[in-house]
Amino acid sequence: MGNYITFPDLLIWLPILAGIICFSVGKEKAAKSIAILFSLMILGVSISTLFFTNEVKYLMYNNVNYLWLKYLGANYYIGLDPLGRMLTLLTAIAFPMVFISTSISSKPKPASFYGLMMLTQAGLMGVFMALDALSFYFFWELALVPVYFLSSIWGGEKRIQATFKFFVYTFAGSLLMLIGIIYVYLHTGARSFEDGTLAAHSFSLSSFYNAQLTAVEQNGLFALFFVAFAIKMPIFPFHTWQPDAYDQSPTPVTMVLSGIMVKMGLFGVMRWLIPVFPMATIHFKNIVIVLSIVGVVYASCIAMMQDNIKKLIAYSSIAHIGLMCASLFAMNQISIQGVLLQMFNHGINIIGMWIVVEIIENKTGIKKISALGGLANTAPVLTIFMVIISLANIALPLTNAFTGEFLMFSGLYNYNKWFAAVAGLGIILSAVYTLNMIQKVFYGSVHHTTAETTDITWNQKLVLTIIVVIIFFVGIYPQPLIELTKGAVDNMMISIK
């Protein structure tokens, strides 16, 4: 393949091109306009991939496969299957919303900021489309490296400490995964080429699925891959880098970390961990579920005690991801479908919450919940949006998160009712800390810090309106998203069996 431009080509090269242009223009306004323009083009490409009905043409225009390191058996192989389409769509939706609703004009070198953000998008797209283990690892690092610079250059006062912790965790996870990839590669079969030459092994996804591994080898390799993915999600006890990173990173970067990048870990589990190590998955699944549920309750309890609104949302995200991980390892059709829906819905909702937090911080300069109050009087439109998005985040019926959460709990209950009961505490606690935050920040008497606050601008209203429309559309009629992810569910069930 490669005689024509495919959709995966465009989803990789458009953000790379945009990043290069942003680095060269030098001015914030021009760089932001370029980032918005290209991110909207990427969104158009991603939406176009949803309308292929002809299977032959779909395979033709949605797969890219080139020889890369021939005698190592490594290909540059990317493609859009149902799982990849859903997550690339989420990524494509998120970036223009982030760019349109935020500004970093007060920060140094803003053009470089947008250039690095576009390179991050290219890496994320590659991770979600990679069908070769070495390509997957390459894009995994491409997505992470720009974030180090984004956080360390444009972050808060304690950004160096937070970024260093983030670097240590993610670098350790990446190194463990690379060791695991090389080991599995050495246990794959030989690969022949059209010219009669032979590679001893292969990095292809199919070769990894058929690698000759004993149960003991699978157990060890499962641990290597799982730690890498657990750090990225993150789940307990690999989560400690996240609250500080979310607090100290520029809020647009936090939106990407929280809304999209955490899905890299869940995606890795679904694409690589469970199918490649099925025996080890069965062996360790209860341990993973227990860790995930402990994380749900622990993070929810910590969120209840937070006075920093950014850390409250960070711990809220840990709780939501923990529930997704637990449901994924329940490994039944209902729970997996719920996880796929919730991956998309969580991304939309959490980005909406971060947009509101960014607006509040820019207008007041404050992150302390106790130092805010009465915003409903000075910014009523912002309040309406935050209430809707917050209620969606706690899975109120008729909002997008309700369907996914209902399916996840149903699947988890079918697997083990006690796991479901303990995880259910997360629903109660999330309602407590979320509604408490809304009451303290937006209602009550007007605090002197919010007395002069004005309401939101047209671009912020536009983005938040789009988020609310998605919340209610998916909440009332989730079938299109279910149909989009149905193939991914079927593939997961085949790999489990």
Image: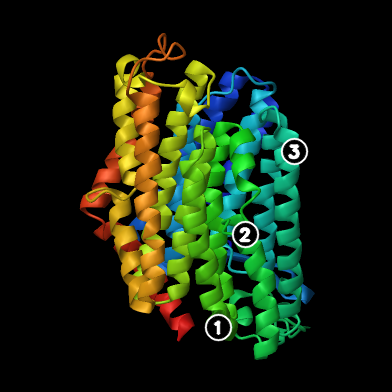
Residue 175 found in image quarter: bottom right
Query: In the rendered structure, which disc, 1 or 3, sits on the residue that comes first in sequence?
Result: 3
Q: Which residue is mark 2?
A: 237
Amino acid tagged 2: Pro
The answer to whether residue 275 is above or below residue 430 is below
Q: Residue at position x 51%, y 20% from top?
A: 362
| Residue count near mark 3 (Cα–Cα under 10 Å), binned few <14, some 14–19, many ≥20 | some
Q: Nearer the viewer, mark 3 or mark 2?
A: 2
In terms of depth relative to the viewer, which is nearer, 261 or 156? Answer: 156
Instruction: Indicate which disc residue 207 carries.
Output: none
Q: Looking at the image, can residue 29 be seen?
A: yes
Q: Secondary structure at mark 1?
A: helix
Position in image of residue 108 (x %, y %): 69, 21
Q: Residue at position x 48%, y 81% from top?
A: 495
- Going by the image, does 306 lie left or right of 195? left
The answer to whether residue 452 is above or below residue 474 is above
| Residue count near mark 2 (Cα–Cα under 10 Å), binned few <14, some 14–19, many ≥20 | few
The answer to whether residue 124 is above or below residue 223 is above
In terms of depth relative to the viewer, which is nearer, 301 or 351? Answer: 301
In terms of depth relative to the viewer, which is nearer, 194 or 272? Answer: 272
Query: In the rendered structure, which disc, 2 or 1, sits on the residue that comes first in sequence?
Result: 2
Q: Nearer the viewer, mark 2 or mark 1?
A: 2
Q: Which residue is mark 1?
A: 278
Q: Looking at the image, can residue 53 be seen?
A: no
Q: Residue at position x 70%, y 71% from top?
A: 224
Q: Nearer the viewer, mark 1 or mark 3?
A: 3
Q: Which residue is mark 3?
A: 161
Amino acid tagged 1: Pro
Distance between mark 1 and mark 3 Cα atoms: 38 Å
